[in-house]
């Protein structure tokens, strides 16, 4: 189950670190294409100058028989074309290296794949809340070592600002593990009482969710947001418990949204 259904995913795509990574990839690709276009124009002009020099050599030679000037122009044009080709080759090599390694390189790059919502029930199978977990993915080309997925849920009065809570935030301890390239990792879960869902829907309280992934002894991805309930949870979940993801959205806000 995914916290970011299509509607909210489209709305928050520019704010969420997960979509930011993809957006940055497209931006880098677009910048590369624009740079290639400009360079192609300059290289085309440079090749044209070389050909003009060679053409001038032929004109001089056949026109007035000045072989010395013709030879000089021919050699100059040939050297010009060779240098232009060398510059073009070097540019292609450098930009190919950047485009292949500039986004992920040979390193781990972890982002939030999705959030998981499951019914929280008591011993009599009565619904008493929601269990929230995370699924992180290593989008990079190398394993993420010493990875720790952390999650924290807090409920506060409706007037609370998320950035007033964040500085004192502490994540519970979690085990370290390794995440191979292009694979996912589940975190531990936090519990959100059903009364909180109702009170958030009624505007009486705010529910804040804080996520953090640490790996490779220094890299991290951190996400913070406010939980929003779009429909009356009591009415919806009494009929269908599996509808939990349909009534919950995460609004990405706060200063604790970063990635290194």
Image (cartoon, rainbow, N blue to C red):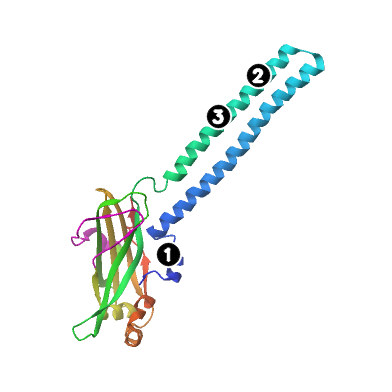
Q: Earlier in the sequence, mark 3 or mark 1?
A: 1
Q: Which residues are magenta?
A: 163-188
Specify the quadrant of the image occupied by residue 76: top right
**Split into 4 quadrants, where in the image is the N terminus?**
bottom left
Specify the quadrant of the image occupied by residue 134: bottom left
Q: Is residue 190 above or below residue 52?
A: below
Q: Which residue is mark 1?
A: 12
Element under disc 3: helix
Instruction: Please state which of residues 73 and 9 is positioned toward the viewer in this rendering.
Output: 73
Instruction: Please state which of residues 72 and 5 is positioned toward the viewer in this rendering.
Output: 72
Q: Position of residue 222 (x, y in %)?
A: 31, 57
The alpha-carbon separation of the residues under discs 1 and 2 comes to: 60 Å
**Camera sees residue 46:** yes
Q: Is residue 128 above or below residue 167?
A: below
Q: Position of residue 145 (x, y in %)?
A: 26, 51
Q: Is residue 171 magenta?
A: yes
The alpha-carbon separation of the residues under discs 3 and 1 comes to: 45 Å
Circle 3 residues within 10 Å: few <14, some 14–19, many ≥20: few
Circle 1 residues within 10 Å: few <14, some 14–19, many ≥20: some
Q: Residue at x 79, y 13 (%)?
A: 65
Specify the quadrant of the image occupied by residue 3: bottom left
Q: Earlier in the sequence, mark 1 or mark 2?
A: 1
Q: Earlier in the sequence, mark 3 or mark 2?
A: 2
Instruction: Please state which of residues 224 and 113 is positioned toward the viewer in this rendering.
Output: 113
Q: Which residue is mark 3?
A: 86
Q: Which residue is mark 2?
A: 75
Q: Residue at x 30, y 72 (%)?
A: 206
Tag nearer the camera, 3 or 1: 3
Element under disc 2: helix
Q: Position of residue 106 (x, y in %)?
A: 36, 45
């Amino acid at each position: 189950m995914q916290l970011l259904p299509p509607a909210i995913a489209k709305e928050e795509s520019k704010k969420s670190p997960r979509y930011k990574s993809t957006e940055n990839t497209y931006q880098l690709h677009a910048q590369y294409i624009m740079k290639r276009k400009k360079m192609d124009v300059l290289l085309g002009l440079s090749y044209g100058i070389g050909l003009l020099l060679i053409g001038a050599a032929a004109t001089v030679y056949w026109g007035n028989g000045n072989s010395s000037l013709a030879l000089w122009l021919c050699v100059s044009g040939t050297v010009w074309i060779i240098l232009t080709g060398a510059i073009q080759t070097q540019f292609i090599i450098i930009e190919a290296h950047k485009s292949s390694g500039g986004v992920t390189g040979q390193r781990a790059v972890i982002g939030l794949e999705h959030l998981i919502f499951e019914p929280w029930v008591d011993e009599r199978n009565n619904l008493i809340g929601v269990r929230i977990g995370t699924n992180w993915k290593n989008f990079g080309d190398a394993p993420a070592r010493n990875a720790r997925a952390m999650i924290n849920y807090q409920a506060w009065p409706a007037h609370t600002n998320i950035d007033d809570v964040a500085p004192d935030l502490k994540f519970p301890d979690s085990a370290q593990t390794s995440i191979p390239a292009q694979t996912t990792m589940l975190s531990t879960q936090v519990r959100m009482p059903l009364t909180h869902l109702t009170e958030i829907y009624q505007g009486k309280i705010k529910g804040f969710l804080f996520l953090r992934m640490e790996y490779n002894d220094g890299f991290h991805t951190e996400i913070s947001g406010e939980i929003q309930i779009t429909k009356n949870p009591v009415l919806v979940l009494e009929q269908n418990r599996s509808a939990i993801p349909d009534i919950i959205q995460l609004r990405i806000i706060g200063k604790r949204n970063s990635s290194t």
